[in-house]
Each structure stands twice: as C-alpha cells, then as structure tokens.
Amino acid sequence: GAVVSQHPSWVICKSGTSVKIECRSLDFQATTMFWYRQFPKQSLMLMATSNEGSKATYEQGVEKDKFLINHASLTLSTLTVTSAHPEDSSFYICSAIDSSYEQYFGPGTRLTVT
Amino acid sequence: AQSVAQPEDQVNVAEGNPLTVKCTYSVSGNPYLFWYVQYPNRGLQFLLKYITGDNLVKGSYGFEAEFNKSQTSFHLKKPSALVSDSALYFCAVSATDSWGKLQFGAGTQVVVTP
C-alpha cells in the first residue's frame, strides 16, 4: 500500500525556537494533505488542510501564523511551528490523499518544547 | 457540523471472546465512516470504511463494522479477540462535501487479556 513518512519522528526544541516537520508521500502524488494534532491520551484534532500550490486552510482556532504550512510539491508538505512554547508539545500526524481518494496517515512526529 | 461519539473509554475482553467497540455519529447528509487503530507512539492504521452500499463492512485483521443509519451507529466488531488487538481505536466521520477532513471520536482503549 501507499506510504506516508514524517521527519523527524521526534524532536526536542527550546522555547522560542522554530521547528519544521516534513510529511512526504513516498510512492504517490498527493494534491491534498492534512495535519492533525494529538495530545496525550486524547483524540486527533484536524489543524489544517494543505493543498499543493496554494495556501493552507486552517481550522477554527488554529493560529496560521504560528503553524506555517507549505505544500510546495505533490509529495511534500511541511509544518513549521514558530516560536514554540511548551503548550505546543504534542504528537503531530499528517495524512495524504491519493488519486483514488484513499487517505494514508504518517507515523507521527512527537514534539517536545522545553 | 459533524461529530463522533465513542461512549466507552476502555473495553476489556478476554482473548477469544467477541469484541465490540461502539461509535455513533452526527453529520449533515450521508456520512463517510472510518475505523482506525493506533498503537503506542505510532500513527494510525486503517481498518475499514463505509462509503455506500452494503451496511456490513469487512476490514483488516478480521474486523468488521455495521452501518446503521436509523441509529446513526457504526460499531466495530471482531468475533474472536486476540491479545495483539490491544490498542487505541478511533472512529471517524467525514461529510460528503469535505472528503478527507476527518472528525475523530475520543478513542476507545481496548484491552484483551490472555
């Protein structure tokens, strides 16, 4: 089946710094990718829809200036957490949709802000 | 607006016994319904989905789910649980006009004891 990768799988950064998370569709092209956030022992919350070649669409309550999304190619979307704070610590999961409208999830990236 | 309810935080079952994880949903129009499983510190694994057609959907690893429109339910079932089925299970719904944008339930922890 199709594979979606995320890099890094885990990252620790200091408060005030920025961190970039990559989401790649390895064997298919994805015009649409999604970014989700999951707090410990909680459900996934959709953050934004990433469309190749256009601006991301953010869900209500998600700060677009804090969570920068770039979908520069059909196989790569990036999420940059700017000026990170401890409350941004979370598990970030991306997903990608292929040409058959099947959705595949990445393995997730655990971000810890100290 | 769409929503998903998983009324049980945890389901305990003995190995070999039937397993049921409950899910009810609310969505405008016809729903797209999904079940995913998550192992610790991992991404989501797709189990099955209902789009249209037969109300009984068979998925991966021996799981199945029945779509019940009148009760707005989509319960996940497995006839004989395995210890390896112990994991976190998520039900999700997508509206027909927002394919890929999943609203997840809170999740149900399944514990299968030997």
Image (cartoon, rainbow, N blue to C red):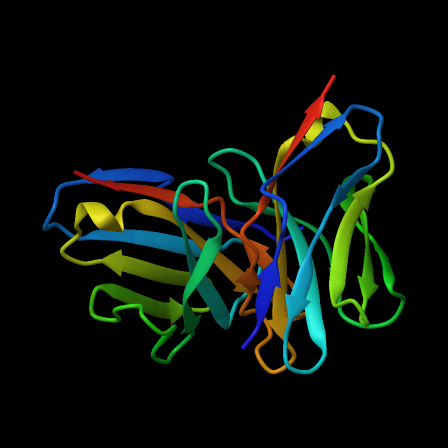
In this view, B45 is above or below B68: above
The front one of A58 and A102 is: A58
Position of B71 with respect to A63 (left or right) is: right
Image quadrant assignment for residue A57:
bottom left
Position of B98 with respect to A36 (left or right) is: right
* Residue at (27, 45) in percent of width and height: A89
Q: Quadrant of the C terminus of chain B?
A: top right
**Residue A16 can be seen in this image:** yes
**Residue A27 can be seen in this image:** no
Image quadrant assignment for residue A70:
bottom left
Position of A13 with respect to B82 (left or right) is: left
The front one of B11 and A54 is: B11
Q: Position of residue B113 (x, y in %)?
A: 71, 20
* Residue at (54, 77) in percent of width and height: B1
Q: Position of residue A101 (x, y in %)?
A: 65, 70
Q: Position of residue B67 (x, y in %)?
A: 81, 63
In this view, A22 is above or below A50: above
In this view, which residue lies farthest toward the left? A16
* Residue at (41, 71) in percent of width and height: A50
Position of A103 with respect to A95 (left or right) is: right
In this view, A60 is above or below B90: below
Q: Position of residue B51 (x, y in %)?
A: 76, 70
* Residue at (53, 70) in percent of width and height: B101
How many marks can you see?
A: 0
The front one of B109 and A108 is: B109
